Image (spheres, rainbow, N blue to C red):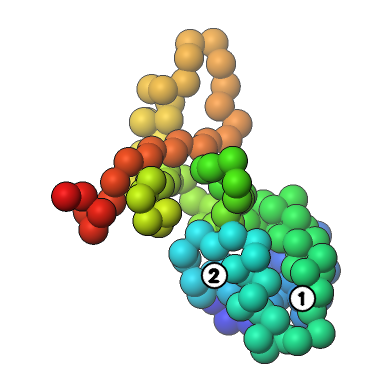
Amino acid sequence: MTAKEMAAALCERGVRPTPQRLAVYEFLCMHPIHPSADTVYEAVVEHNPHFSRTTVYNSLRALMQAGLVQELSMDADEKHYDANTSLHGHFHCRHCGSITDFPLEPTMVQSLTPTGYTALGQGIYLSGLCPACQP
C-alpha cells in the first residue's frame, strides 16, 4: 500500500491522516510482526525524532477505533498490534514470544459461535511452542 493509499484509507474511516498516524500505520502495514506499542514507537522515532511516545500511543488508538488496526491481548504484560484486519487467528509461542497468523474460514467462526448468539468480532488465539522452539 502506498502512502497515498494509506492516507485515503484513513480518510475513508474518518481519521485525519497526520504524519504521526501515517508513520505508525505504515510501520504496521510494512512489518507484520505483531509489534508492541514500544516497538512501534522505537521504530518510528528513528525517522521522526520529534514524535513522542504519547503521540504514537494515541495514533495506535485512533487507528484501532477506525478499524484499521487490531489490538492483541495475548499476555497480561503487553499488547500487540496488527494491521491485518481480515479474518484470521493468532498463535503465540510461549517460549520465544513470536506471534504467527493462521487462516480462518467464516464457517469455522460460525461453528464456534453458541446457538442464539451473533459474533460481531473474532479473537481466536492459540498458544504453545512454534516449530523453532520445539525440542
Q: Quadrant of the N terminus?
A: bottom right
Instruction: Give the residue type at disc 2.
Output: Cys
Residue highlighted by disc 2: 29
- Tell me how far mark 2 sits from mark 1, CA to CA: 14 Å
Residue at point 60%, 46% (across, down): 77
Residue highlighted by disc 1: 20
Disc tally is 2
Q: Nearer the viewer, residue 96 or 82?
A: 96
Residue at point 54%, 10% (across, down): 116
- Res 25 seen here: no
Q: Is residue 119 left or right of residue 17?
A: left
Numbered mark located on residue 3 in the image: none
Q: Nearer the viewer, residue 76 or 86?
A: 76
Q: Residues within 10 Å of mark 1 (few under 14, many from 20)?
A: many
Q: Is residue 6 left or right of residue 30?
A: right
Q: State the image coordinates of residue 41 (x, y, percent, origin top left).
A: 68, 72
Q: State the image coordinates of residue 115 (x, y, percent, origin top left).
A: 48, 11
* Residue 48 occupies quadrant: bottom right
Helix, strand or loop status at disc 1: helix
* Residue 44 occupies quadrant: bottom right
Q: State the image coordinates of residue 97 (x, y, percent, origin top left).
A: 42, 54
